[in-house]
Amino acid sequence: MPRNMLFAVTAVFLTFVSVGCGAQSPPPAGTDRIKPTYNTSTGRLERITYDRNGDGKVDAWAYMDGTTVVRAEFDSNYDGVVDRIEYYGPSTAASQRETSSAVPGAGVLTKIEISSRPDGKVTRWEYYENGARSRDEEDTDGDGRIDKWETWRDGALSTVALDTQGRGRPDRRFVYDADSSEPRLEIDADGSGQFQPAPATAPR
């Protein structure tokens, strides 16, 4: 890859890292904190690694398809364990409309996996359609089972559903209306999948 193109791709990745993880201003491309890896047969760029905090340890990895980021991994708290993985797909006309402010060269965001555990096991999954956030799933108690579900519409939280009974499916649901800041609580009391408005509580 020509040197000027490598610098351009690296600059895209560093901007992408800064936006995604709140990193401080990155060093200029070409420093020893930024290292590209090329396919030995084709010469095609396959990976860029980055030491974000300058401690001599890599904490961000961009996996490339030539000049396009297809996956990025981060050790966001610098403990040596990857705790955030972002997946990117090819850009489309619809995704370009949804993500007009997205970093060029990173493709369109399709999924984020996040770990809140010291072992790096994923506990939260965020899904995107055409670059826009559509739904999330989370294992809030670390037992290996999803117990929280979120849906998103037009960039705003639409519903939050919770499994409070350990059934593997939601039994409480908060519904957010577009014209109201207060969510509405709905309950599935018998596990049938049918939600009803929660009984009103009498004022004290």
Image: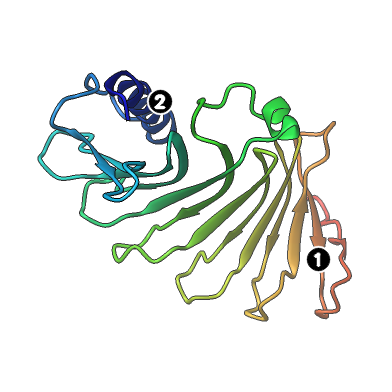
Q: Are marks 2 and 1 in contact (CB under 8 Å)?
A: no
Name the secondary structure under disc 2. helix
Tag in front: 2 or 1:
2
> What residue is shown at x 42% (from left), y 30% (from top)?
16
Tell whether 198 sits left or right of 116: right
> What residue is shown at x 39% (from left), y 66% (from top)?
121
Indicate the amino acid at tag 1. Answer: Ile
Tell whether 127 sits left or right of 119: right
Which residue position holds label 2?
12
Q: Residues within 10 Å of mark 2 (few under 14, many from 20)?
A: some
Tell whether 193 sits left or right of 50: right
Name the residue at the front extreme. 41
> What residue is shown at x 15% (from left), y 25% (from top)?
31
Q: Which mark is residue 203?
A: none
Where residue 13 appears, as percent x and y from the top left, is 38, 31
Mark 2 or 1 closer to N-term? 2
Q: Residues within 10 Å of mark 1 (few under 14, many from 20)?
A: many
State the residue in front, 108 or 180.
Answer: 108
Q: Against 120, is 12 above or below? A: above
Kindly indicate the quadrant of the structure image that contains residue 138. bottom right
Name the secondary structure under disc 1. strand
Q: Against 10, is 162 above or below? A: below
Where residue 144 appears, as percent x and y from the top left, is 49, 76
Kindly indicate the quadrant of the structure image that contains residue 59. top left
Quadrant holding the N terminus: top left
Q: Against 95, is 169 above or below? A: below
Indicate the amino acid at tag 2. Answer: Val
State the residue in front, 37 or 153.
Answer: 37
Where residue 85 appears, as percent x and y from the top left, is 43, 51
Where residue 197 appears, as percent x and y from the top left, is 88, 59
Which residue position holds label 1?
187
> What residue is shown at x 21% (from left), y 54% (from top)?
80
